């Protein structure tokens, strides 16, 4: 049996403090904390603002944000003179900063079917648009009456929805926009894809009811359903 006792045996001399020389503890040299540049500090504030507003909404005040950052409110105002400037930066960080040019280019790739193009587009789109901060900030902005929704939806309409409507006409052999301008009903029909996809994010980040099925498969089904309906509905909208 192994003796785990720390008591020395009778015939063993007791160790004394002088029997084993003590070595001085080695204290690692502390590196001085890196001093952030103005641009780095501004970016840090912006990133924390994204997390903060995604959590509490735009009713949260800058004083609490400054406390979370461990800085004074006056320092916060040095980089963002008011709350509106901070909200504008949040818009740039979340919506403009995560915009993927692939979403635009794949729409116009006529070497593959429109159904396949839309499937690829929205599978990639979901990776950005169904994140916690994207969904919650978008919802909080709408409830608060902030400008984020309008600015983003204007971009979405011009760069995604209208091009899809144009390509849908081409895919179905319907008159081009030079022959017949786009109608609002067409854009509304395309909106239905975004509404459906965005709802998956709402379920998870607003209603706390995550989607259980594979998201890519749900997007494929959404696009297939849209294309099947467009074959019948779009000619009726155009009156042809």
Image (tube, grey):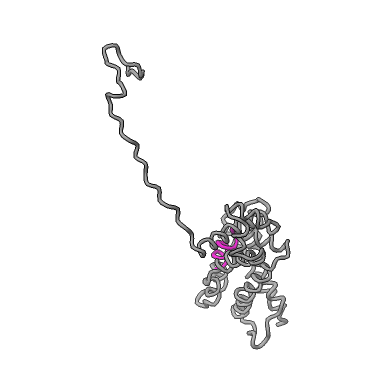
Residue 214 in percent (x, y) is at 56, 55
Seen in the picture, residue 235 relative to 43 is either above or below; the reply is: below
Q: Hey, which residue is sitting farthest top in the picture?
A: 10
What span is colored magenta in the figure? 121-131
Residue 91 in percent (x, y) is at 61, 66
Q: Residue at x 64, y 84 (%)?
A: 177
Q: Quadrant of the C terminus?
A: bottom right
Q: Nearer the viewer, residue 216 or 174?
A: 216
Left or right: 197 with respect to 43? right
Tally of numbered discs: 0
Q: Quadrant of the N terminus?
A: top left
Residue 12 in percent (x, y) is at 27, 15
Q: Residue at x 68, y 57 (%)?
A: 61
Q: Residue at x 49, y 62 (%)?
A: 37
Residue 230 in percent (x, y) is at 66, 73
- Residue 6, magenta (yes or no): no
Quarter location, residue 88: bottom right
Query: Magenta stretch: dominant SS?
Result: helix
């Amino acid at each position: 049996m192994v003796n785990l006792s720390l008591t020395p045996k009778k015939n063993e001399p007791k160790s004394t403090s002088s029997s084993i020389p003590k070595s001085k503890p080695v204290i690692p040299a502390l590196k001085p904390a890196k001093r952030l540049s103005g641009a780095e500090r501004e970016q840090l504030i912006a990133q924390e603002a994204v997390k903060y507003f995604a959590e509490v909404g735009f009713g949260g005040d800058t004083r609490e944000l400054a406390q979370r950052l461990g800085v004074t409110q006056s320092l916060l105002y040095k980089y963002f003179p008011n709350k509106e400037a901070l909200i504008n930066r949040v818009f740039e960080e979340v919506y403009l900063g995560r915009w993927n040019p692939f979403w635009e280019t794949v729409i116009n790739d006529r070497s593959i079917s429109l159904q396949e193009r839309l499937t690829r587009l929205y599978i990639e789109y979901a990776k950005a648009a169904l994140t916690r901060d994207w969904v919650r900030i978008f919802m909080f902005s709408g409830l608060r009456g902030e400008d984020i929704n309008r600015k983003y939806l204007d971009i979405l309409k011009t760069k995604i929805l209208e091009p899809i409507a144009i390509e849908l006409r081409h895919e179905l052999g319907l008159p081009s926009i030079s022959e017949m301008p786009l109608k609002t009903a067409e854009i509304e029909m395309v909106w239905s894809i975004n509404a459906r996809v965005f709802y998956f994010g709402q379920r998870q980040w607003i209603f706390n009811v995550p989607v259980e099925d594979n998201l890519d498969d749900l997007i494929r089904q959404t696009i297939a359903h849209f294309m099947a309906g467009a074959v019948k509905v779009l000619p009726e909208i155009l009156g042809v």
